[in-house]
Image (tube, coloured by chain):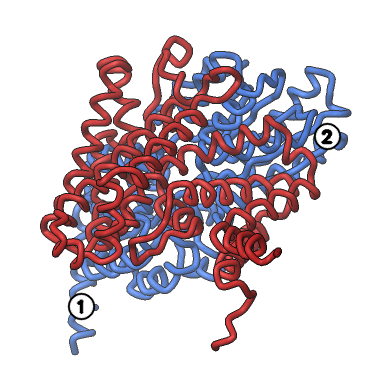
Chain colours: A blue, B red
Amino acid sequence: MKMNMKVALACTTAMLGTAAAAQTVTIGITQNNVGVDSYQTTYERAFIAAAEANPDVNAVVLDAGGDVARQIAQMEDLIQQEVDAIIIWPTNGEAVIPAVRKAHQAGIPVIVTNSNIAEQGFDFVASFSGPDNITQGSRSAEIMCDKFKDMGIENEARVVQISGQPGYTTAIERQKGFDDRLPEVCPNVTLVETQPGDWNREKSQQVMEAFLVKYDDIDGVYSGDDNMGVGALNAAKAAGREGIIFVGATNFAVGYDAMAAGEYWGSIYQSPVDDAEAALKTAIDTLNGVELPFLNYFDTPKITQDNMGEFTKPVF
Amino acid sequence: MTGPTKQGVGNFLAKQGILIAFVIFMIGFALANQRFIAMDNIFGVVRSSAILGVMALGVTFVVIGGNLDLSVGSMMSFSTIVVLDLHDKVGPALAIPMMFALTLLLGAFIGFLVGYLKLNSLIVTLGMLSAIHGLTLTWSGGKNMDIADKSGTWFSFFGQDRIMGIPVPILIFALLAVILSMVLSKTPFGRKVYAVGGNGQAATFSGIPRARIVFMTYLVSAFCVATAGLLQASRSLGSQNTVGQGMELEVLAAVILGGASLLGGSGTVFKTVIGVLILGFIQNGLLLVGLDFYVQYMVTWAIIILAVWLDVAAKRGRLWSPIA
């Protein structure tokens, strides 16, 4: 009985919806951990701004604070509120799957943003909107290889890698992209060692100090993001080791500055504003029945000292 | 004839089990990679450990006083962010004392809750861990904090300069360790900290102002955290909001590894320093040996357990206890 009521109600709402020309949709978002870093803080601001700029969108903006349990509770709240679509920035790619399935079963399309959930949950996801981290890793390898070719050391260069937090999808994918692409473009460059810097500048500086003690000859450093890259750069500067090519990903303001100063070679430009706007657009397109690829990536171009003038300095 | 000397050696071993463990690890890593004992590596490790170490010195006071401090990690993030932010607003000469004052204020607040209101220190400082994190984020608006003009400031002195070839962070760590060690072992205040942590009730009955002593230990801890924040900020001249996240447990591990009892009343500054160095050198040693990093976590754990075991074994004079 109750079930029927609900269906009837849903039908009426749907009919009313099609009748009205400009239909207002409610989109709920549960974010990973706003405030933990400037990327996520900027993302939230951009998301709210984009939603406010669109008169047809009503946004419910939530933050899980990095807590899986809280995120699952927020998913349930959004299902209860019967929002039209849910965007989730997973705190954990595995643990949120049951909650995503629940939303799917309630007929609410789920859009995953920034970092994807694990593959077994793909059936319950309408679309993924975010950066392609494997491509980012490949592009970093290409930036580094091109630079080595310019310098004429593509046959003997030695590279170390400082990866993100072990176990994080973003860290794993960027590393995979870099590891796979480097030997394709520069088969004679040696990747000597990879150690994690945990997305942390201080930790990365320590790792780089150890690398510098261990290896007399380092020509390039690839870091999973610029924050760690600048930590590695600090270590090299303190040790007086010059001529090392630093390439990162997720261009941060500090990385941009270091590039302007000629100390840091290149990175991948990933804007949290693009990320947030792409997520909202993906959600709206899904609701409007637009055909989308399941993995709906937004572009993250290469940035180096040569072309940095085309990009504005990141705000984070 | 050899009796007394033998006993003397035995006593020494029993007292310094953790020091012996430390020496054994150093030799082990040095054999695995000669560069481990290169002077620049040793300086590098001690310099990185100095931040953790300075924090651990303060927490040693709190733990000996019979309490815990789980807020030091986020408090360190706070002082780092605050000093970096103020640096560009009011200049380093004012930013540093202002940051110390604000951090001491946080310490005083915790000290008041634990000392005078007698609230459980675990709950108070666990709560403060997230409260201070929130405070830091509110201060910074969630943004990374960076000094705009990195090459034109003397602020980098504390984290990056050397005096007579020795990195400044090491000198500050050593100086603070010596001073705090004297305070703990040679002053009435130090003796009262042991008394309050060893047996609080007895201390009260002997006329020791327990609340005030506990309050003071948190001030010492906050002072050390502020110093650590200064070193951190000066070392990288920029920081994310989570720079100290998780350090409270590393600090606690170093203090306990050094032999301080979680129940209070025992521990020394010197042993905490050894605990800090063990953690620092393990991390560095495993990097130099080049173990796969997933394995490093497990090996780190195994080495810490081994160190604690050696310490306990030295105290009781045998490797395992005959009484099950």
Is circle 1 on the same chain as circle 2?
Answer: yes
Rendering coords of residue A207 (x, y %): 62, 40
Rendering coords of residue A169 (x, y %): 56, 55
Callout 2: SS: loop
Q: Residues within 10 Å of mark 1 (few under 14, many from 20)?
A: few
Q: Where, by quadrant of the figure, is residue B40 drawn?
A: top right
Q: Where, by quadrant of the figure, is residue B10 drawn?
A: bottom right
What amino acid type is highlighted by mark number 2? Val
Residue B156 visible in the picture: yes
Q: Nearer the viewer, mark 1 or mark 2?
A: 2
Callout 1: SS: helix
Name the residue: 62% across, 32% down: B43
Q: Which residue is mark 1?
A: A8
Name the residue: 22% across, 46% down: B216
Instruction: Say which mark, if any, is on residue B103.
Output: none
Rendering coords of residue B310 (x, y %): 61, 66
Q: Which residue is mark 2?
A: A189
Rendering coords of residue A111 (x, y %): 41, 57
What amino acid type is highlighted by mark number 1? Ala
